[in-house]
Image: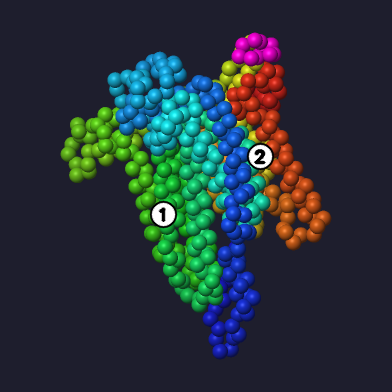
Amino acid sequence: MAATATAEPTEAEEPPAPAAQASTASALYPPMPSSGWRGWAGPIAVAALGGVLRFTELGRPNAFAFDEVYYAKDALALLRFGYEQQFVEDANDLILASDGNWRTIDVFGPDASFVVHPPFGKWVIAAGEWMFGVTPFGWRFSVAVLGTLAVLLIARIVRRLTRSDLLGVVAGLLLAIDGMHLVMSRTAVLDMVLSFMVLVAFGLLIWDRDMVRRRFAGRIPLAPSEWGPALGPRPLRWAAGIALGLACAVKWSGLWYLAAFGIMTVVWDVGLRRSLGVARPWTATILRSGPIAFVAMVGSAAVAYLLTWSGWLLTAGGWGRDWADSQPESPIPAALRSLWHYHAEAWNFHVGLQSDHSYESSPLSWLFQTRPTSFYWNSVEQGVNGCDANTCASAVAALGNPVIWWIGVAALLYQLWRWAARRDWRSGAVLVGVAAGWLPWMLYLDRTIFTFYSVVFVPFTVMALTLTIGSILGPADAPPERRRWGAIGAGAIVLLAVVAAWWFYPVWTAEQIPYDLWRLRMWMPTWV
């Protein structure tokens, strides 16, 4: 989308024609496809569909699913103490048998608990427990809200990326019916909170990119210069930094997105300055925008991150809270030194985690979804709980929609080509989102990790697939025959994804089905 700025006319030169100026301005800031309610109707509709899929029977299974056994109880402890606390051995049974009142449930041990993830994701889960009680519905509620809002967000983001209302709706629909995103939206674990905050940050940076270019689209042409004009205030970049700080306050893997998105937005500034005719765009950006961008992104992220530890900092009983009291005097406040010690201990745990797990998977396999994580499994015999087959099964498998993921692999390769050969900045942005959530795990192939960590880059995989569908569909001014076949190809992909979602929905949501039907849905032996 870069365009070359036109120089100020000399006596021997004619000023640029109005049509040329309009073309340059349009290239800098292409107009949006619609305005008002027309740009919101489709995204809201697919978000409503996503909400129905995520909230229907949200309390099923009526049990702790996978790591809910940790995070739902940690969220309860945050409500009661402001920090995580140890639990008695039969805490799970006591909670499920209780009335769900977080103020009266007594399942705590005498000591604080050492946990290795920051508190923000658990505070999100705690909000649902505060509103609806310490029940499966209560501890899943807030995560389901974020999963639903993510559908709305991606529809609006892709609409802005592509300047197409239709492709925005397609992206929202694909995210709504992806199994990985759906399961993680219906389970009280941290990864959906992380995925949501990363998506928020990405959307804010895309918006920021547009707003800065819009300022200059009406001022083309500009006189060429060595440094170029100041780009003006960037409140959306600060907001993105806050979102990324909250992502880091869910899991430290958010740091990769802070670094990747920070570099990405600075590179965009280089491209803008080059479009405006700046002679030294890299030097001008690094010296003029770089320091401010660093403060906006990293500084705001650090403040947001620290604030999420308020419960631990402002109380006295958290694990390691008084560690600094036994250390030599220092001008740094004792609470901050104790917090640093806590982080060092958590880091040592993370890098040394190598315990075997039956559902661990290599990140090399994530894009192909060959080893999904089983979050819940139960089987009953005929006549029990309404089972009318010899055996019935209910399961929650954190398995992506195969159509979205398997065609998505080809879409990612195509977007890589578009970025390398066509210099399409949109392809590059989407690839950054995938790379920051996937490639860092290649450094920890010996660590115990799971396929569901990939939920953080599910939205970017969906974006890559949607951009590819847009290419299949073809430009609006293409010949009718080209558009017809393009519509058939694009529609076929979406239809196959919908059919796959219908087929796999029972094993994403713990719906009780005959065991034979469950087996039919296990397409690979590694899915069992």
Residue in view at x 35 percent, y 22 percent: 104
- Residue 18 at x, y = what percent? 62, 78
Q: Quadrant of residue 503?
A: top right
Q: Secondary structure at mark 2?
A: helix
Mark 2: amino acid? Ile
Residue in view at x 50 percent, y 77 percent: 223
Residue in view at x 43 percent, y 60 percent: 234
**Residue at mark 2:** 404
Q: Secondary structure at mark 1?
A: helix
Mark 1: amino acid? Trp
Residue in view at x 51 percent, y 38 percent: 145
Span highlighted in magenta in the image: 382-391
The colour mode here is rainbow
**Residue 348 or residue 65, whichever sits in front:** 65
Q: Which mark is residue 474?
A: none
- Residue 15 at x, y = what percent? 59, 83
